[in-house]
Image (tube, rainbow, N blue to C red):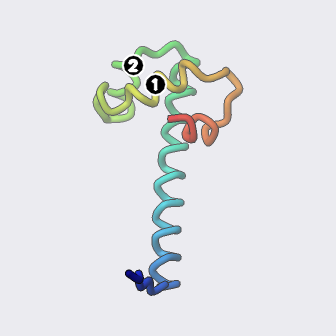
Amino acid sequence: MSILYEYDEKKQRRLDWEEGIEIGEETRLIAQVHKKISKNRSIEIIAEELETTVDDIKPIYEAVKDAPADADPMEIYLNL
């Protein structure tokens, strides 16, 4: 059995670009959550301020709480 694979460079660049956007948005959200935690905001307040739900923000909130205070948002993202 042989597998045919056609590489589409434009499609791959587009996928890479979209993935980069997604990672950028996620790390920006992590940085925002980190800043709000440092101001002693509760998860409920953070969710409200970021216009999301507690359920959506909970994994990020917990990852930020468990990370060292000087952790880089990308480092936290990679450990989610």
Estimate the x, y position of residue 25 in percent, counting from the top left: 48, 49
Q: Which residue is mark 1?
A: 61
- The answer to whether the residue labelled 1 contacts the one labelled 2, judged by CB atoms less than 8 Å apart, is yes
Q: In which image quadrant can residue 59 be found? A: top left
Quadrant location of the N terminus? bottom left
Measure the alpha-carbon separation of dots 1 and 2. 7 Å
Estimate the x, y position of residue 11 in percent, counting from the top left: 45, 80
Q: Is residue 27 above or below residue 53?
A: below
Q: Is residue 40 left or right of residue 72?
A: left
Q: Amino acid at mark 1?
A: Tyr
Any part of residue 31 in sight: no
Estimate the x, y position of residue 31 in percent, counting from the top left: 56, 35
Q: Give the residue drawn at x 48%, y 45%.
A: 26
How many marks are shown on the rendered structure? 2
- Dot 2: few (<14), some (14–19), or many (≥20) neighbours within 10 Å? some
Looking at the image, is mark 1 or mark 2 nearer the viewer?
1
